[in-house]
Image (cartoon, rainbow, N blue to C red):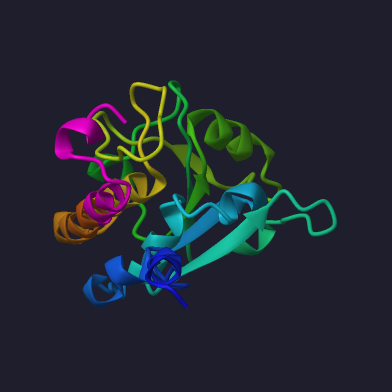
Amino acid sequence: MGTRSKRSERCQRCRMHLHLCLCPLIPRYDLSTRLVLVMHHREQIKTTATGPLALESLSNSELRIHGHRDRPLDFSDLDVPGRRTLLLYPGDDTPILSRSFLEGDDRPITLVVPDGNWRQASRMGRRLPGLGHAEMVRLPEGPPTEWGVRREFHSEGLATYEAIARAFGIIESPVVQSGMEELFRLMVQRTLHSRGCSDRESDRT
């Protein structure tokens, strides 16, 4: 096998090229907050999908695939008295996720996050069956995305990993957010490097 073939192989865990593998650097958090990542089946195969990397950092997490007609999803199993279900939804009229929003309900949280661009996430959030009990929340305004690999045309659009990190920063702690974001920046840096982008070029990607 030639050098070019080896450099094109990808790690099955972090999805990076093998020579850029992030696995030894992935932080691991054992938290009461549960992440349920919902990916469209077309998004699942994309190497630029960032959501799966969050699953590797968060032990209390799972992936559910949306869009298979013969395997429809049902989230009614998340409706349990001992947990509070929040659905991250990018709607302007949706309550903002904050510490004050979380006060008054001390149940551990299950956070459901649709994985896709702004439009896909908003459409998916309205179509997931069995989530009638979930409370929709959106992230507060924050710094612009650092994701320069795929275009996001909405001014407030974030990579799924970034959105998850910021949500966990509010629900759990800023320490968790900081650790996750540090890995994300490294992933972006290595991805752009593999594409031959300089820092200046990455700003225009």
17 lies left or right of 126 = left
Position of residue 68 measured from the top left corner of the image (x, y, whole percent)? 77, 53
Work out whether 183 lies above or below 138.
below
Determine the residue positioned at 85% across, 57% down: 70
Q: Quadrant of residue 125?
A: top right
Main secondary structure of the magenta stretch: helix
Please give the range of residues in magenta: 187-205
Magenta segment includes 191: yes
Position of residue 129 measured from the top left corner of the image (x, y, whole percent)? 71, 47
Determine the residue positioned at 68% across, 39% down: 127
Considering the image in quadrants, where does the C terminus appear? top left
Work out whether 5 lies above or below 166.
below
Seen from the viewer's position, the closer of residues 96 and 193 is: 193
Position of residue 190 measured from the top left corner of the image (x, y, whole percent)? 25, 55
- Farthest-out residue, front: 2
Determine the residue positioned at 40% across, 22% down: 154
Magenta segment includes 157: no
Determine the residue positioned at 53% across, 52% down: 46
Q: Quadrant of residue 3?
A: bottom left
Seen from the viewer's position, the closer of residues 107 and 197 is: 197
185 lies left or right of 4 = left
Q: Is residue 179 visible?
A: yes
